[in-house]
Amino acid sequence: MRAWFTFAGRCAAAAALVALTGCAHPILIATEKSTPAAPAAKKLDRNIGFVIPDTLLTKEVITPGGGGDKVSYLPYRDLEFPLYGTLSNVFANATKLKAADDRAAIEKAQVSYILTPEITTDSSSDSALTWPPTRFTVNLTCTVTDLNGKVVLKKVVTGQGNAEFSEFKSNFSLSAQRASEDMLRNLQKTLSEAPEFGAALPSQPPKVATAR
């Protein structure tokens, strides 16, 4: 009799999981701990600003999970702080700008470069019964310009993350966070080794006089 109840319980659990298929489960693809722990061996003696518009901070993305379900997340919001930390690992200082032409903030922070990120993601899972994705990919197109708007560097960096079912007990977002950490490590390496930042900077555009 006990065996029958055990079997019935398993069937009920499976039925519940099937009933929930199609849901989009919220996850965090990055945390403040996603920033690479160690800074670049030699930081660049220049300051950088980065631009993430408010509209992107609230942009929700939905990609596949397991069991026919999906996962939802806000990639720009989740990666904003660890991106700042990664840039601080490479440059003397990093500053978030409201816009690429935010002259007051650029002058105050003595910014030399402006980075605009573009983030795309994908996920998948072979599991038919559990929803957390076992594979996750984060791509970041890194466009860096000087203060005249000229592109200094444009690269795509990618991060891959994998996680097994047994690891999800403590963190359903694990594969996504591993992908973000991998991408940020690759971004830090790409920026710190880019020869483009060793070139002489062009003269800055003249300040616009304000009427008194």
Image (tube, rainbow, N blue to C red):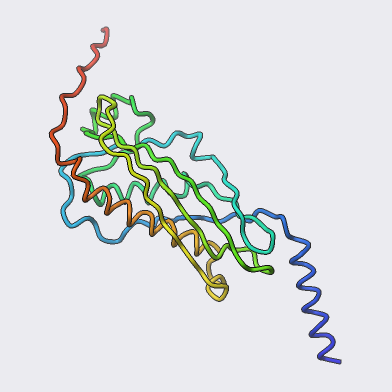
Q: Residue at x 69, y 69 (%)?
A: 129
Quarter residue 38 falls in: bottom left
Q: Quadrant of the C terminus?
A: top left
Q: Residue at 21% across / 33% down in the picture?
A: 112
Quadrant showing the N terminus: bottom right
Q: Residue, x 18% and y 44% (percent of image)?
A: 195
Nearest the viewer among 64 and 55 is: 64
Residue 11 at what x, y percent from top left? 80, 76
Q: Residue at x 22, y 39 (%)?
A: 47
Count of residue discs: 0
Q: Position of residue 117 (x, y in %)?
A: 39, 40
Q: Nearer the viewer, residue 210 or 73?
A: 73
> Is residue 42 found left or right of 157 in the rendered image?
left
Whether residue 186 is visible: yes
In this rendering, would 120 be left or right of 2? left
The quadrant in which residue 53 appears is: top left
- What is the x, y in percent for residue 89? 25, 52
Residue 75 as seen in the image, left or right of residue 14: left
